[in-house]
Image (tube, rainbow, N blue to C red):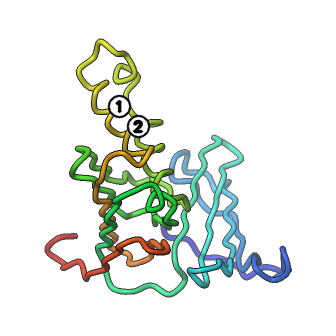
């Protein structure tokens, strides 16, 4: 989504940790009308530094969009998080909209669509999102995919070790966790 913003009042919210830096009404990618109000905030987030929060809502069709990411982008990167126990589930995750999530041991691959949101959560929150977006038939004990959901639930309890991989072509995702093994490496252009 390409948009041009007018700079807004830089009023400070929450003791200067969050401030709106831009706001505009743009063309909605769904209905095509210039009726989508978009706001961009700059947030000084503990452990991560400056983070950009973007949100938009179309007043005509109701479409909503959001993204989050580090202000200072880097080159495309892969973040590998080794989750070995319950404390690693509390590592904070900033997942930018274009980032791909992979958890090989749990058979999870999430490829973002054009309206995929960015979000801030924890490693456990990523697993909860997987369960929340699983097909409803996977919640039926008689369905073969139910066992995969149960393995993800055991992982959420810290009873299954796994690797969370975030591949971000924008370089705006990040993971921070005290004592958690986190590896960042450059994502080559061929892998994007």
Closest to the observer: 122 or 64?
A: 122
Residue 50 point in image, percent of width and height: 61, 83
- The quadrant of the picture occupied by the C terminus is bottom left
Residue pictured at 70% horizontal, 77% vertical? 22
Tell me how many marks there are.
2
Q: Secondary structure at mark 1?
A: helix
**Badge 2 vs badge 1, beta-carbon distance below 8 Å:** yes
- Side of 18 relative to 119 (left or right): right
Closest to the observer: 109 or 30?
A: 109
**Residue corresponding to mark 1:** 150
Residue 7 point in image, percent of width and height: 73, 82
Residue pictured at 68% horizontal, 77% vertical? 43
Which of the 4 image quadrants contains residue 71? bottom right
Q: Is residue 24 above or below residue 63?
A: below
Residue pictured at 54% horizontal, 63% vertical? 67
- Side of 87 relative to 8 (left or right): left
Extreme left residue here? Answer: 190
Residue pictured at 45% horizontal, 44% vertical? 157
Q: Estimate the spatial distance between the alpha carbons at disc 2 and disc 1, rounded to whole Å.
A: 5 Å
Q: Is residue 163 above or below residue 32?
A: below
**Residue corresponding to mark 2:** 153
Closest to the observer: 18 or 57?
A: 18
Q: Secondary structure at mark 2?
A: helix
Q: Is residue 93 above or below residue 60?
A: below
Extreme top residue here? Answer: 142
User: Dot 2: few (<14), some (14–19), or many (≥20) neighbours within 10 Å?
Assistant: some
In the image, which disc is placed on residue 1?
none
């Amino acid at each position: 989504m390409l948009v041009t913003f007018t700079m807004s009042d830089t009023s400070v919210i929450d003791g200067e940790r969050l401030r709106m830096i831009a706001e505009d009404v743009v063309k909605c990618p769904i209905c095509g009308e210039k009726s989508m109000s978009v706001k961009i905030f700059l947030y000084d987030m503990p452990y991560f530094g400056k983070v950009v929060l973007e949100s938009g809502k179309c007043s005509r069709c109701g479409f909503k969009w959001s993204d989050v990411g580090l202000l200072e982008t880097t080159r495309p990167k892969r973040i590998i998080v080794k989750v070995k126990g319950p404390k690693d589930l509390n590592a904070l995750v900033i997942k930018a909209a274009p980032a791909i999530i992979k958890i090989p041991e749990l058979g999870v691959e999430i490829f973002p669509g054009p309206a995929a949101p960015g979000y801030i959560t924890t490693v456990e929150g990523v697993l909860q999102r997987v369960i929340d977006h699983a097909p409803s038939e996977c919640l039926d004990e008689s369905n073969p995919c139910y066992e995969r959901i149960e393995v993800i639930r055991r992982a959420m309890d810290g009873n299954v070790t796994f690797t969370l991989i975030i591949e971000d072509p924008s370089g705006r995702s990040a993971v921070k966790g005290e004592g958690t093994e986190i590896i960042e490496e450059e994502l080559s252009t061929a892998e994007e």
